[in-house]
Image (tube, rainbow, N blue to C red):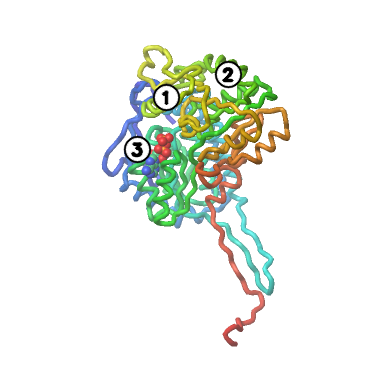
Amino acid sequence: MSTPQPQTTERRYQLFINGQFVDAESGKTFKSPNPATGETFAEVAEADKADVDKAVAAARKAFDGKWSKISARDRGRLIHKLSQLIERDAAQLAELETRDNGKPIKESTYIDLPGVVENFEYFAGWATKIEGETIPVPGQVFNYTLREPVGVCGQIIPWNFPLLMAAWKLAPALSAGNTVVLKPAEQTPVTALELAKLIQEAGFPEGVVNIVTGYGETAGAALASHKGIDKIAFTGSTEVGKLIATAAADNLTKVSLELGGKAPNVIFADADLDQAVNGAMMGIFFNQGQVCCAGSRIFVEEKAKDEFLGRFKEKADRIKVGDPMDKATLMGPQVSEEQLNRIKSYVDIARNEGATVFTGGGSPELAEEFKNGYFFQPTILSDVDNSMRVAQEEIFGPVSSVITFKDDDELIQKANDTIYGLSAGIWTRDITRAHRFAKAIKAGVVWINTYNMMNAASPFGGYKQSGYGREMGKHALELYTQVKSVWVDLSGKPIGWFGK
Ligand code: ADP
């Protein structure tokens, strides 16, 4: 892999279809800016329906051909090889991720890339462990099941963890023997195409993985509605998730969706307050707040409110915002100008709804070099009521809404009063209260006295409008396999039903 070039130099990328790097059929390209400076970082081929058609055809050919003939062991070995190549190039990939997405280099180095390696490693191991069952049916009959791949999978991913989301999608799909057409987000196309180079180097047969960069409304929509795919997996906004499910419904394509959230992160007065403040910070300011499981509604027990807000503000104000390539930076820019404007508009909405901007709420003062970057301050909104828009709608930025509650019943009622159900956190020393909450909250992931913990072996996904299906862990294999029931007569006798 080549050494990353200086920030101002444009990098050029082509689509990855059938094992080759190719231009878009239309010859069109689009520009991906560096969010820290607003300058173009890469110029990338822009896929359209014609390219998606080509990619799906390549994936089908690979699925019916070479890939189906490769043993589970060799599939696992290829995926493992890929994880090793990613580990080899982790430093360069982390740098590219930071330049394309804006996230601090500390995060891409210590969170994103290790997570990518972990996911490929974990699912490499599963390839040889996907098994059917024998079923004890009555009579002289043998019944068994085969767990088979679904086929050609379309996968559409977001921009907040570009390479990690590619890993969450590709690793289980490949492990189970599927082929893939992956569409990265238009804001962050670079690292998926760098991954394509490693997929080529690892020696995957052509067409097993195809990567088509382009816009959601064109390439994404063409993939979601394609008659040639057997499954579509999507991570992104709930709004687009509904479009994907609607498009897939026409062909009855299998769908899995990992969508938005408005997670409650609950702080009881009996919690270790220092830890709870750290957890609140991790919940809402990690990755610039661009996290679907962000703890964006912070519920604080009324009597702890003032102390919590004081400590939370003090820490939030100390977050180092700025150059994402600086190892000491803890918050980089938002991914795009569009996102930045959206966040600003939500702070205006909060003010109009009667909330208080307790800290932040605007753009930070930064060096000349970053004046066109999409930076926003860590922001705390207090005096928020759970019915306000800033408590009900996903902002997807570093904006936390602090809401108070008096007792457990009021808390559960308010915490569950949302269309979302992806995750939740609770901070308390009372173990009974913590587990009661874990049971009562309608969310797919619950963190007790911690936040944002994840592992390739543990399932992740949402209740309610946060989606359906679970990624990671053995649960992800359910998304990428289907079950066939096989019946065998052992009696040797003719079927007598209609007479012998
Ligand atoms: P965000 O709103 O946070 O940018 P989106 O849900 O819009 O997130 O985008 C997530 C992914 O979905 C991206 O890869 C994007 O290109 C894609 N996408 C957006 N709109 C559509 C659509 N209508 N059909 C299919 N994919 C889409």
* Residue 425 position in % (x across, y down): 61, 32
* Residue 334 position in % (x across, y down): 43, 25
Q: Is residue 277 above or below residue 220?
A: above
**Numbered badge on residue 309:** 2
* Circle 3: residue type: Gln
Q: Nearer the viewer, residue 272 or 57?
A: 272
Whether residue 289 can be seen here: yes
Q: Quadrant of the C terminus?
A: bottom right
Left or right of 445? Residue 174 is left
Do residues under tags 1 and 3 come within 8 Å of each other at their CB atoms? Answer: no
Do residues under tags 3 and 2 come within 8 Å of each other at their CB atoms? Answer: no
* Circle 2: residue type: Leu
**Mark 1 / mark 2, whichever is N-terminal:** 2
Q: Which residue is mark 1?
A: 352
Inter-mark Cα distance, 3 to 2: 49 Å
Report if the beta carbon of the residue with label 2 is closer than 8 angstroms to ligand 1.
no
Q: Nearer the viewer, residue 172 or 432?
A: 432
Inter-mark Cα distance, 1 to 3: 46 Å
The quarter of the image that holds ligand 1 is top left
Left or right of 325? Residue 14 is left
Q: Quadrant of residue 344?
A: top left
Inter-mark Cα distance, 1 to 2: 21 Å
**Mark 3 / mark 2, whichever is N-terminal:** 3
Circle 3 residues within 10 Å: few <14, some 14–19, many ≥20: many
* Residue 232 position in % (x across, y down): 45, 49
Q: Which residue is mark 3?
A: 14
**Mark 1 / mark 3, whichever is N-terminal:** 3
Q: Nearer the viewer, residue 318 or 118?
A: 318
Q: Which secondary structure lies at badge 1? A: helix
Left or right of 396? Residue 43 is left
* Residue 398 position in % (x across, y down): 48, 25
Circle 2 residues within 10 Å: few <14, some 14–19, many ≥20: some
